[in-house]
Image (cartoon, helix red, strand yellow):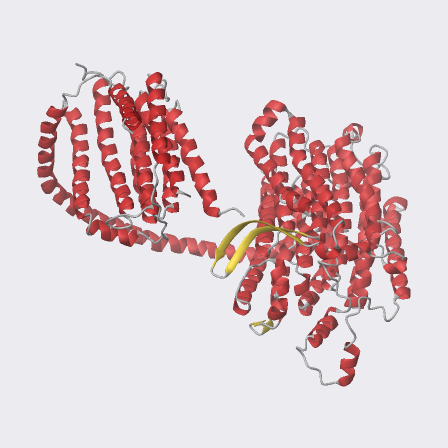
Amino acid sequence: MGYIQTVIPWVPILPLFGAIILGVFGKKIYASLGENITGILGCTMPMISAVLAFSSFIALNGLEVSERIIRIPIINWFSVAEMNVDWAFRYDPLSALMIMIVTGIGTLIHIYGMGYMHGDKSFWRFFSYMNLFLAAMLMLVLGDNIIIMFLGWEGVGLCSYLLIGFWFTEEANAIAGKKAFIVNRIGDLGFLAGIFLIVLFSWKTVGTVTLSFTDFKANIDVLSQQTFWGFPLLEVIGICFFIGAMGKSAQIPLYVWLPDAMAGPTPVSALIHAATMVTAGVYMMGRTYFMYTLAPHALGFVAIIAAMTCFFSATIGMAQFDIKKVLAYSTVSQLGYMFLAMGVGSFSAGIFHLLTHAAFKACLFMGSGSVIVALHHKQDMREMGGLLKKMPITGFSFIAATLAIMGFPLTSGFFSKDEILWKAFINGSPLLWLVGFIAAGITSFYMWRLVFMTFFGETRADKHTWDNCKEQPKRTVVPIAILAFVALTVGFWNVPHFLGGHSNFSNFLDPVVHDIQSKPADNFRRIQLEKGIVQHSDESDNHSVAKPAAHSEEQVDHTALEWGLMIASVAWTFFTGFLAYYFYMKNPGARAKIMSSLSAQKIFTVLNNKYFVDEFYEAVVINPIRKLFGFLAAFDQMVVDGLVNFAGFLGRITGTVAGLFDNQVVDGAVNGAGWTAQAGGKGASLLQSGKIQTLIGSSLIIFVITVVTVVVFMG
Amino acid sequence: MSLSGYLAVSIALFTLGTIMFISRKNTIAILMGVELVLNAAALNFMAFSKFTQSQASQLDGQIFAIFIILMAAAEAVVALAIALSVYKEFKQILANKLVSLKG
Amino acid sequence: MIELSELFFYFFTVMVLGIGCIVAFSQNLLRSAFALFFVLFGIAGFYVLLGGDFLAVVQVLVYAGGINVLLIFGTMLTADVATPESSNISFQSVLTIVAGAGIFFLLLFIINSAEWPIVTQEMVPTTKHIGRLLLKEYILPFEVISFLLLASMIGALVLVNKGDQR
């Protein structure tokens, strides 16, 4: 037990040190010691944190299940009235998993970054910011209370801004960074509102406010009975927190920053916008699962938004030509899947998809980055093709990750996506399942379209680029290969029952993230009845609900249905993958024929321009605000200037009066003081010797000697 | 923290000020040394004001520290005026060269 | 867990003594003058820890904001235009070291061997009390120091003006 307590506080602090050292001394180190040393320095702290994270996970497994929630307080931060916030970390199965993902993938991406950023003159600044990001993200997932999590939340938002606008000398990049930060902030407003509500109502009901997750969970029954403006309190807080998640994890309507964020370097996209920062919203919902269990309407809202996002961005991804934009919309869509799982109450399924997505999406981004660098920073897929022969390791890893994302049987993506779709069907509604199902097919289509356009067929790159294109150095491709392997195998951690496994992952997370085993609304009703909150007059209803909370709701055996849905998904994704193959490899002519029809072109324009959402926001939201600014500025100039001028006039009058007084009274005093000084000075100037300092120094020494003598010889 | 902690800091600061005072050549630097010494004394007074009893009122030490600050202001003004006059006259303010009071 | 006020005490100690060393030993006079700002802020921090909230603000306003600025003016007005560093140390260094060490150890010894009658009291906002004290028990020093400030202002003006008339 002592090992975890000693080691975990260092996990977020070491990258912070790395960030500070590289931030302050990085320029000098880069200039004097060269790129390799700077890169190694940038990678050591994440590596050490990763070692600590993985070893803590092993230690955690050695503990009893009931002892697996460990609170590590560091220092009391502030204590105001009845509110007491500690700076404390919390290590339990969920945060153990998250820090393994963050540090593991983080370290691999840092090493990859050494290759990707080769030759860039801001090499040191990149690693400083990346380390800072790791520190903030680790603080987010290790926080014991909502305030620390929020600090990490804001910190990753800041680092996202810094890293997206890394090459800020290009105006487009700076604008993208600004957009990310501002849209994030809008979401954070909702998050803050949720926090304020928790503080207010905790204080009203329980009397003390600590905002730590354990206390929040303990008080949740009392809080569930409160209402806010007529609505149940937990529903409101649930929606407020989800608004924060909308901003951070790019759901409708606050997803618009993520595609623009591709302006940053590809390692940034891989780490932040695929594996870690955008998953903060999912983590947050997992952490507060106990609240969402008691807020079925909020969960419904989440599920609907998630399904819409999932489908909507998948359709946009179909029509993009920039390789990174396709992956960006794919990320938004996959995040939709995660929130869909959360929305139907299967929190551990959502987190499992977080894990698998982190592995394969980071691999995909890194692979695309490798391709981009090899082709000298070309990102348009219409200029690629046939790269598999030139970049085999990158290519095959990319294909492996594509198999994972489409849900090819036995890959990690297969297990996680199928789990989500099954739970959406059984605990949500068949309509939710249908949306997810269709989106899975679209996912498979656009991913294979990407693969075929980039790695197969005749190349469309110009000769010079083609000749210079080769496989990237080891430090770039080895992380890609490692992650491809993980993407293929990590799925076996959570093999579901109907396929013969034991859902080990869900069981591992169970003490801290407990799934809802039936429809959220039914589950909520059952809980209320159990606690006697709602009396039901109907006897028969009482009997049917009086069963103790069954751990497996398999009174009806759904195995056949599960098999059926799984086979349908696999067949559908294979079909759309084949469609991609047909239209892009086998018979491009058919594609040209379809695209030449007017309606197809119109649809394509809409998809390619992202449904004109950005333009819509510009017209409806941003322009009115600009007009308001203009009005306020004019008001400022007219009213405030007038006041300032008036104040100046008053000052002049006062000054004249004071001056007159000064002249009369002060003259006499000056003469008197002067005469006194002169007379006194004549007497005192007999103190001669040129160097006053010697005089004083020697007198000090004599003083010291005198005192010592007196004390020593006279007792 | 504890009284001895503050007194130790005050002594260290006093010593730094004395060293500056005795060994620097530039008059303004000597003045800075004097400022350090005065600050050390004021800190001393404040520490005693917090930790010990006092006759007239508990805040005796703080009153004294206020007067120290005010006096330091007056002294800094006069000292700088002198330094400027000296600079005008002798074109330099290095203490080891301003020895016309010798004898 | 660590006490927050202890943390602050150490922080201010390091700030005052560390930057005090910069003030004392820097070759660049302007650097010393600007470092003195931080020392004064550190002392203000100590005052806060000792319950002298009004005094801390007075320190920052008058000492850091007035006297230190004055010192910086003095530095710039009397500087050698050609060389920005205008002060040097290690002038009569033997004397310095002996005197400095002697004073330091003597005072340290005095402090350690004394038994201070310690009485801790709670911290109250002091502004009201200081105001009352200045106008009741300490009215005489208050008036005298007003006169002192006036005299010093006048003296400074005279000194500077006298140079002009010559």
Figure check: A213 above or below A108: below
- Residue at 81 percent across and 65 percent down: it is A425
Residue A187 seen anywhere in this rendered image of the structure: yes
User: Farthest top residue?
Assistant: B103
- Residue at 37 percent across and 26 percent down: it is C24
Figure check: A34 above or below C123: above
- Front-most of residues C121 and A691: C121
- Front-most of residues A219 and A241: A219
Quarter of image, res A53: top right
Figure check: A347 above or below B78: below
Question: Is A251 placed left or right of B23 in the picture?
Answer: right
x%, y% of residue A270? 71, 43
- Residue at 78 percent across and 28 percent down: it is A468
- Front-most of residues A345 and A425: A345
- Front-most of residues C120 and C51: C120
x%, y% of residue A344? 74, 64
Quarter containing the C terminus of chain A: top left
